[in-house]
Amino acid sequence: MTAIPDKRGRFGPFGGRYVPETLIPALDELTAVYQKARRDPKFRHELDYYLREYVGRPTPLYYAERLTKKLGGATIYLKREDLCHTGAHKINNTMGQVLLARRMKKPRVIAETGAGQHGVAVATVAAMFGLQCEVYMGTEDMERQALNVFRMRLLGTTVTGVNAGSRTLKDAISEAMRDWTTNVRTTHYILGSVLGAHPYPMMVRDFQAVIGREARKQIVRAHGKLPDYLVACVGGGSNAIGLFTAFLKDRRVKMVGVEAGGLGLSSGKHAARFASGSVGVLQGTMTYLLQDGDGQIQLTHSVSAGLDYAAVGPEHALYQERGRIAYTSVTDDEAIAAFDLLAQTEGIMPALESAHAVAHVVKFAPTLTRSQAVLVNLSGRGDKDVHQIARMKGVTI
């Protein structure tokens, strides 16, 4: 495990706890339970068992031969988190947190979701362990991700639409936090990314770090050495930090996080926090976020619901300021083109979130040599996005 955050939940100047006093006891309880569990061999054995036998880990590291030849530069590998049960990396974290909820004897779990993959993962583990489950989702995202809404309901979960604000992920998180404040004695909030108040950014990172631990061993076997570049999309940032953590001490391994450029940075309709954001507090944590001069949260836009959020995880903010991780953005159009490219060269339809990472690789891989390796975290599969892409292309399914 990494040495950060500190005991106050600070990643340098970022992170911390900015929540109502009524939630402090719940956060203290969760911190104590998690700190004990992470040192408990029984807990780690139980988590490893379910990740292996239920989630399907380890996920493969795939040499994208045809994509490599098409782009004509670096050797490209894909970490296939899209092959996890439920179709994304999200279940790594939900499996860990549901085991904590059972330790705390909480019969009910709640969650927020944007793209719906986290919601599906929470609904899945709740069904698996017989817990009551409610997921909050912005009504804009419910329209974009109708398939995942139906999947959650099939799993026995109550999906509650949030019609406030931008009707997207930010508003779903706010509603979930209100629920937790009211029902804290019986309910555990399974937050889906490296966001929120301590211990969530640390805890979610630790549960997702399995991605990087596996990838580090796999790339050495496949390529004979560590990769030259790691690339991952960044919404809240859990799939990215899950991959990056295992390589942070390897200074020659360059890391790139790809944010949602939406309709272009100049349009103002995007979710590129590092490109035009500033430091502030949102939903429990201090980090980089999109806000106006008065500190009011700005509306965001992305073709991918999972990247459509005004803030980024505090650990990402720290590494951006230290220069350890570089952050860039790609537009909606570039992400959709990358979706098409990967589907037609490798027979793999990535989630639109993951397509942002692929889109960046399309730009820079041709500038490298074949001896250089680029490892892309394919954080989820694109089944959930097919209807949305069809509408954008004017196709009726």
Image (spheres, helix red, strand yellow):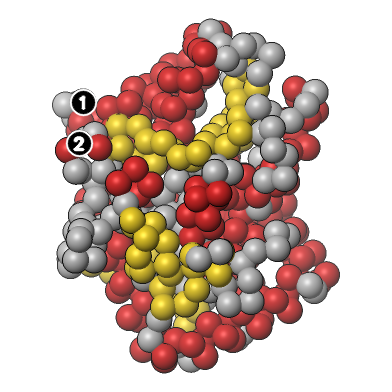
Picture residue at 30% right of the left edge, 74% below the top:
175
- Dot label at residue 332: none
Percent across and percent down for residue 142 are: 26, 55
- Secondary structure type for disc 1: loop
Q: Please report whichever mark, 1 or 2, sits nearer to the chain's N-terminal start.
A: 2
Give the quarter of the figure containing the N terminus: bottom right
- Dot label at residue 266: 2
Picture residue at 70% right of the left edge, 76% below the top:
35
Residue 49 is left or right of residue 263, and the answer is: right
Identify which amino acid the numbered label 1 is placed on.
Lys
Mark pair 1, 2: CA separation: 24 Å
Residue 163 is left or right of residue 17, and the answer is: left
- Secondary structure type for disc 2: helix
Q: Nearer the viewer, mark 1 or mark 2?
A: 2
Judge whether 218 appears above or below 26 on screen.
above
Percent across and percent down for residue 253 are: 66, 34
Residue at label 1?
Answer: 393
Give the quarter of the figure containing the C terminus: top left
Picture residue at 19% right of the left edge, 43% below the top:
268
Give the camera-side residue of 3 and 173: 3
Percent across and percent down for residue 163 are: 17, 66
The image quadrant that residue 150 belongs to is: bottom left
Give the camera-side residue of 389 and 240: 240
